[in-house]
Image (tube, rainbow, N blue to C red):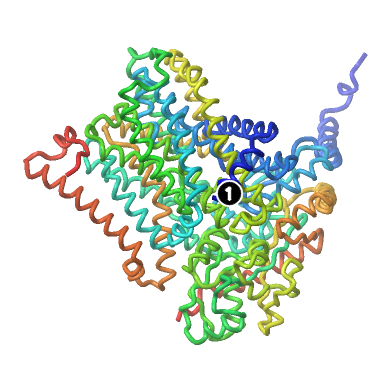
Amino acid sequence: MISPVKRVAPKYFLGALASLALLSGVASAQDYPRRPVELMVAYPAGGSTDIGARMVAAVAEKLLGQPVVVVNRGGAGGQVGWTELSRRRPDGYFIGFINLPATSTVILDPERQVIFDVDAFVPIINQVLDPGAIWVRADSRYQSLKDLVEAARKAPNTIRAADTGILSDDHLAILMLEEAAPGAIFRIVHLAGGAAQMQQIMAGNVDVAFDNVGSIVPRVRSGEVRALAVLDDRRSKFLPEVPTAVELGYPGVISRSARGIAGPKGMPAPVVRKLAEVFKKAMENPEHVSRMESTGLALKIMVGAEYERYYQEAHAQAKKYVEWARSRPRK
Amino acid sequence: MESLAHLLSGFAAALGPAYLAYAFAGCVCGTLIGVLPGLGPAAGTAILIPLTFQLDPTGAIIMLAAIYYGAMYGGTITSVLINVPGEAASVMTCVDGHQMARQGRGGTALGIAAIGSFLGGLAATCALVMIAPPLAKLALKFGPPEFFALMLLALCLVSGLAGRSLAAALLMTVFGLLISLVGIDPVRGAPRFAFGIADLYDGFGIVPVVMGLFGLSEILLTAEQPTRDIVRTRLSALLPSRDEWRRSWGAIWRGTGIGFGLGLIPGIGAIVPTFMAYIAEKRLSRTPERFGQGAIEGVAAPETANNAYANAAMVPFLTLGIPSSPTIAVLMGAFIVNGLTPGPFLFQERPDLVWTVIASFFIGNAILLVLNLPLVGLWAKILHVPFKYLAVGVLLFCLLGAYSLQQSVFDVWVMIAFGLIGYVLRKLDLPLAPLVLGLILGPALEKSLRTSLEMSAGEYAIFFTRPLCLALLIASALVLAGAALQVARTAWRGVIFDRAAERGGREP
């Protein structure tokens, strides 16, 4: 018996091979995933992005039919992890968390010399939207945001305001408040993160802290700290009694930290759809919802065009303040 | 004595079969994590968090805490046996621990480490129960300026690590500090000395550097001496002799004090107490020249200190809700995921849970001792493996360890490069420990200096107007002056550094 392959001319054979390869490409998108999916977190294990990732991964892998392995690529404020995410093959087997506006500010800071751009990532689905908050120790003399701003106007560059790192969302929030309250200038202290902030506030080494609602909810409830304002367009359901900065007459002071999953640019559309669908189901799972609630992290699921639009808007807003951070008056 | 009553009921709960099993499982996992160099306690704990979702919060926290202090002990085993610190807190143990192993006293080294860890952990937990809350408030006074002054003091004390000469120790410290500058600027966020290589943005990882410096260089050096192959360990010699006990006893209590005191200060890290405890022993010893040659105090002090530290670090965490190390931050995540917020209110809201967990610290420390003493003989048998086989094993262990840390091939190259650097340095008889200290303290020193100056808008007066900070600065100056006096006295006698070797680090 003659094999059918021998009868076809070589060029047809090559053509057939090429189309076969193409077909298998489509097929691989259809029967995706066939092996474990890695979910990268650009921070070390144990942070709130990491905890959120592990919670959703535990549910998503049951729906996906393949293990979802959380891998930590911490370092350089996320730059190490995002550099890797931008370089990986866009086949859906390596996806990762992007943190807005942190990913944007890393891209926008010329000193960072990053090798990726804003469109290096395809946003898939957002998990958490955590608004900023301004807070002081419970016995602080600043009873309201107005007190704080007045004091910063009266004695510029004396009130020590802590953020969670240079060009973090909290740093940008301080700049936004300074912009909305002309004449108020803070002495900005860049601390390493939420734990360092809590420590220095309690010890009285800084006067006011800018961080996210998720980091302070239990402390506000226990009465150790006082939240002066939430930096969102609406009140936080975790702190319903705390006014927003917008309500208090500082329009534009809206600073949020968003965490969602993205992949490298060029992923096949069916793969993106499948991932968005699976992770949406996972995030809506009651177990996931209740665990996120108990940690004080506000779930905000955004997919498709909605998340893409948020990503671009957050980037544009970050761009404005990153530029402003460089030219900011000091005295 | 309300807390005593709480503690007793905590014991009653923690001794239940389920909680005992969790503590035991945690100790086993922790020891393994400590032994594997690629998996530090923080990463190990984080990976196991989802596992604990199935348990009740108390059980979950008991298990995670057991992993944490289990890892502190596990790192010792590889330090002693093959000169590879399983995690950073065991670096100091390499210096004398591995020398002891080479002299056939590996079992004793592991034995004293287990006993010291147990006593240190026990004493620190007792202190936690009795005097924790007021002390934690005091430790909070450590702001960035005090932190900077303390780091400076640690660097000045490095003169105590001088083996052959003070100059060599200082040279190595500066070398370590210089290496620590590579990577992203901790305040501005700009890369330094990275030459556009993204892997360098995060600087050199401590673990690959340490594994190369100590472990790989050891293989290279040993390979040059074909005569040495099998070390005979007398299994009967697992427990320290009477003389060794006498030497270790003081070291264990001083190690506990240093570990506990520094553990109260958030952000110190596990490695600084081990260095401090080692230096203290060497300074206090009448025979400092034995250090580096297999002195049992050189194992007992740092090993006790790191366990006392691990338990003391729970104080700011449980009483103030401030995680003082990456591992505890992970633990805090586990608390929060389980709906608990560490802090003063946890003691009031869930005393049952807090005291059960504290009781489990006592039990966990006892489990570690029971688990590890019988295993010491087994571990020590590794030393009976002929060098040609052992070397291949150690090499593989280092390569895999460096890689698995971040699944990064770059870290493997770092490990190899520092193996060669370590080889050259040891050939030149330059001490390695000050290099590691410089590398570790560098970023903390820089960050605290710059944060202090941000707080004061650039005024250096901030360092001299805070009493605690000023006291630490004066102490640093005194240590340096003492060291300078020592050098001057040596020079006065017409002898430069060589003769100083015989005098070692004796008090001026």
Please give left or right for residue A40 compared with residue B176 in the image.
Answer: right
Give the farthest residue toward the right.
A1
| Image mark 1: chain | A
**In percent of the image, x 44 and y 46: which residue is there?**
B260
Please give left or right for residue B377 compared with residue A79 in the image.
Answer: left
Give the farthest residue toward the front.
B1
Residue A130, position as x, y percentages in the image: 70, 64
Q: How many marks?
A: 1
- Residue occupied by mark 1: A74
- Crowding at mark 1 (Cα within 10 Å: few <14, some 14-19, many 20+): some
**In percent of the image, x 59 and y 81: which residue is there?**
A179
Residue A245, position as x, y percentages in the image: 67, 78
Residue B132, position as x, y percentages in the image: 49, 52
Please name whichever residue, B295 or B94, is drawn nearer the observer in this view of the structure. Answer: B295
Name the image quarter holding residue B14: top right
Please give left or right for residue A16 compared with residue B54 in the image.
Answer: right
Amino acid type for the residue under numbered disc 1: Gly
**In percent of the image, x 61 and y 54: which residue is there?**
B347
Q: Is residue A238 above or below residue A259?
A: below
* Whether residue B407 is visible: no
**In percent of the image, x 26 and y 44: which residue is there?**
B159
User: Image quadrant for the C terminus of chain B?
Assistant: top left
